[in-house]
Image (cartoon, rainbow, N blue to C red):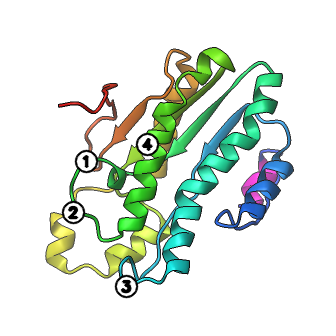
Amino acid sequence: GPVLAERIGGSFVRTDLADRAGVHEAIDAAGPVGVLVNNAGGTEEPHFPEADLARWDRALDLNLHAVMLATQLVLAPMRKRGGGAIINIASTAGLGTASHDSPEYAVAKAGVVRFTACLAPLRDTMAVRVNCICPGLVDTPASRRSRARMTPAELAALPPVLSPADIAAAAMQFLTDDTLAGRIMLCRQGGEPPRLLPVTDGQE
């Protein structure tokens, strides 16, 4: 928030990243950057198929299109500066073949995973490393609201949630290891250590 930004000598811009003009505004305000973390995301009820086009289109704009646009906007400046790192925050909702109560959110996060993997060659062509973190449930205001609606039995069955510090630690691994590009890191809740997913071609 603004207070933290002031303490670390940064700036704070309030904008809507589901609006493409808002993505431009945020990147313009940041100026030249060496590190971009695409962390905005979320979903609102009702979900597909009950949601109308405008609502689930907004979910795709926020969770996928904003990531792609912000990445595109910083690539040339990063290359000019000698390189950089981009970390996309996806979700375990975008992995595997299980169902999810927000199809539009899961589809968008799956898109972020594939988008990241497809950009692995940028390490060699532009000196920009793009990687992705797929967390389970993180302790955020949104997840607290979700947990508040759970029954006692559902809460008892829920593994301990991740902390924002857990995600920051995963991000630091990507920032400090320049051999990693186009990689996906799985961060499950419940105390399981983060792990890099293998690079596969999708063939069984």
**Relative to 174, is 92 above or below?**
below
Task: Between label 3 and label 4, give the one nearer the viewer.
Answer: 3
Q: Secondary structure at mark 3?
A: loop
Query: Which part of the image, by quadrant, shows the N terminus?
Result: bottom right
State the residue in front, 155 or 129. 129
Q: Which residue matches tag 4?
A: 113
Q: Residue at x 55, y 21 (%)?
A: 121
Q: Which region shows up in magenta? A: 2-7
In the image, which disc is placed on residue 158?
Answer: 2
Q: Amino acid at mark 2?
A: Leu
Question: In x, y percent, where is residue 69?
Answer: 67, 49
Judge from the rendering whether residue 58 lies leftward or rightward of residue 146; answer left or right: right
The local crowd at label 3, few if under 14, some if 14 to 19, many if 20 or more residues have their Cα within 10 Å, is few
Callouts 3 and 4 close, C-beta under 8 Å: no
For marks 3 and 4 on the same chain, the one whose residue lies earlier in the sequence: 3
Q: Amino acid at mark 4?
A: Val
Question: In x, y percent, where is residue 54?
Answer: 56, 79
Q: Give the CA separation, mark 1 to mark 4.
A: 11 Å
Q: Secondary structure at mark 2?
A: loop
In the image, which disc is placed on residue 149?
Answer: none
Q: Main secondary structure of the magenta part?
A: helix
The local crowd at label 2, few if under 14, some if 14 to 19, many if 20 or more residues have their Cα within 10 Å, is some
Q: Amino acid at mark 3?
A: Glu
Q: Residue at x 30, y 26 (%)?
A: 200
Task: Between label 4 and label 2, give the one nearer the viewer.
Answer: 4
Task: Between label 1 and label 2, give the one nearer the viewer.
Answer: 1
Q: Give the CA separation, mark 3 to mark 2.
A: 27 Å
For marks 3 and 1 on the same chain, the one whose residue lies earlier in the sequence: 3
